[in-house]
Amino acid sequence: MTVQRCLLEMGWGADLHGGDYTKAAQRAVQNALQHVSLGFTAPLGKSATDLILDVTIGVSEPNKVNKQAVADMFPYGRQKNIKVVKGGLDIPGGRGDDFCAVANAAIVLSLDV
């Protein structure tokens, strides 16, 4: 069998106050998932459980994202690969150390066909 890319979806999310990169990453994933319907698996004799997920998150400080918390958002998939890279955006807030953390997410769903 060969792993075949079936879907690419992108999203963005932000933690408006407090600069929580995990929260921003989760919101980016949630935004991307709002655009996905997985009806394509059944005609291939597969289910959402068979999917391989490759998720890339971009934030200003990648080491501050809890990858397991992001992976736990997916109710499907036999393999969940979460990668966090330098990206996103930090926007200074109006008070002291407060800032808005912006994250981008790219989700690739693949099947072994």
Image (cartoon, rainbow, N blue to C red):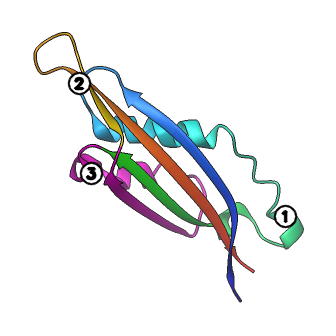
Residue sticking out furthest to the bottom: 1
Q: Amino acid at mark 1?
A: Ala
Taking the view exactly as shown, the residue that stands out farthest to the right is: 43
Could you say which is closer to the camera, residue 42 or residue 22?
A: 22
Mark 2: few, some, or many residues within 10 Å (few <14, many ≥20)? few
Give the residue number, with chain letter if any, for mark 1: 42
- Residue plotted at (71% across, 89% down): 1
* Residue 43 horizontal side relative to residue 56, left or right: right
Q: Earlier in the sequence, mark 2 or mark 3?
A: 2
Q: Position of residue 25 (x, y in %)?
A: 40, 41
Residue 97 shown in magenta: no
- Residue 75 percent location from the top left of the image: 58, 52
Q: Earlier in the sequence, mark 1 or mark 2?
A: 2
**Marks 1,3: beta carbons within 8 A:** no
- Residue at the far left: name it: 96
Q: Residue at x 65, y 69 (%)?
A: 110
Residue at 82 percent of width and 59 percent of height: 40
Residue 22 sits in quarter: top left
Q: Which residues are magenta?
A: 60-87
Image position, residue 65 (x, y; %): 29, 48
Instruction: Provide the secondary structure element on which disc 1 rests.
Output: helix
Residue count near mark 1 (Cα–Cα under 10 Å), binned few <14, some 14–19, many ≥20: few
> What residue is pinned by disc 3?
62
Which residue is tagged 2?
18
Q: Quadrant of residue 52?
A: bottom right
Q: Nearer the viewer, mark 1 or mark 3?
A: 3
The stretch drawn in magenta includes residue 67: yes
Residue at figure coordinates x 75%, y 53% from the top left: 38
